Amino acid sequence: MGPARTVADVGIEALAVHVPRHYLDVGDLARANGVDPGKYCFGLGCRRMAVLAPDEDPVVLAVRAATALFERYDIDPASVGMVVVGTESGVDAAKPIATYVHRMAGLPRDCRTFDVQHACYGGTAGLRMATGWVLGGLRPGRKALVIATDVARYEIGSPGEPTQGAAAVAMLVGDEPRVLRLEPYAEAVHTEEVMDFWRPTYRATALADGHHSIECYLRALEGCWSGFTAESGLGLGAFDYLLYHSPFPKMAFKAHKRLYEVATNGGAGFDPDYERRVLPTLWSNTEVGNAYSASLYVSLAGLLEHSEVDAAGKRVGLFSYGSGCCAEFIAARVGDDASAWRGRTGLRQVLAARREITHESYLRFRQAHEELARDGSFRTPLAPEGVAFCGTWNHQRVYRDATWPAAVTSARPGDACPPSDVLRPASRPVRVQAGE
């Protein structure tokens, strides 16, 4: 056996982002709801929210992020030995999203697959599990694929509606961390059972006690920071940038204000500090909205792809929070070579390719998703150019891809779903293509 490795040898080797192909301006949402747009835009910090089309769901987002990662970084899918999906938007109570990703991304059979659920902490939990697996060294040379994929949905007209969003971030974890190297400090975690945000199994939309959730978040942040500083000896000044889980961008402002007050005993200088170390990480969140477990990593992609920031070699602090609750603070270093990630995450490309929709279209999309799930068959028109899913008569959610037979690929909007024996799983690598 070779020498023992430390967590400093492990981290993110590649990172790619995918978002839905439509968005709604939150100003339009505010006007439709009879609310001053300033409440959404300035009070919450929101600008646009990603909206799923009827043929998109968390699986489609996850697969597109994974295939983009393989293509943009020229990664051989056969190098992956484990797939972990962090999500609270699973499409099945038993079957994990990871298995769909495994097939459609063309991954090898000797590959472990599973999902992790803990509200918005799921992506970080997956990252930590992948890190431990790589460090264990039982599969030398194999990498772990971690995907955070989520869709945030709240009741129409509720306080949470303007914070909605969706995204998937795929990360390859291994011992050549060109994108983000985790630093070898003791874990800084905080857990307590609280009822700040939840979604019962009989509901498609989440419930939240907003003010209580904010306090739970901030209490967890203090707990993590206290543990981290005690073990590491590092202070707030040791970090070039600080990334916070952002259910809405203004939450990062609240979080940094609390941490700054704790770390400096209420010292002056908060505003310029926030603008220098936190604001550059939030522009992508204002474009996407809340993506639950993916939100923190959307922030990371935003920092990497910021046009006026040179993040190479910089130390960053990442605070991950999942309601219920579990939280963690992580210290890491961005890779020294910007060419390993600059322009390769796909973030700017997928944002630029989106189409704006009206409030009426947004409502139609929501209604379509509700109807798809109502009778358990998930039926939807098959757009010939898109990645669509449609149900079979035995309640299976099935995804179309380029390897499926003509009976599927020649379908037109309004066609009935083909029989289940036509929709067989693919047997070779798949590259899904974006539809309109």
Image (cartoon, rainbow, N blue to C red):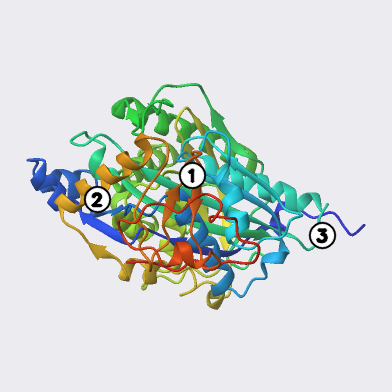
Question: On the picture, is 46 further left or further right than 177?
Answer: left
Up-down: is 225 above or below 103? above
The type of residue carrying mark 1 is Phe
Q: How far apart are the alpha carbons under marks 3 and 1?
A: 30 Å
Which residue position holds label 1? 319
| Label 1 secondary element | strand
Say which of marks 1 and 2 sits in front. Answer: 2
- Residue reaching furthest to the right: 1
| CA separation in Å, label 2 and label 3 | 44 Å
Q: Residue at x 21, y 37 (%)?
A: 156
Q: Position of residue 110 (x, y in %)?
A: 77, 54
Mark on residue 140?
3
Name the residue: 23% across, 44% down. Answer: 162
**Label 2 environment density (alpha carbons within 10 Å; few <14, some 14–19, many ≥20):** many
Q: Which mark is residue 46?
A: 2
> So how many labels did they put on this image?
3
Residue shown at 42%/43% (left/top)? 292
Per the image, label 3 sits on a secondary structure element best described as: loop
Q: Amino acid at mark 2?
A: Cys
Instruction: Give whichever of discs 2 and 3 has the lower sequence position.
Output: 2
Which mark, residue 420?
Answer: none
Quadrant position of the C terminus in the picture: bottom left
Specify the amino acid type for callout 3: Pro
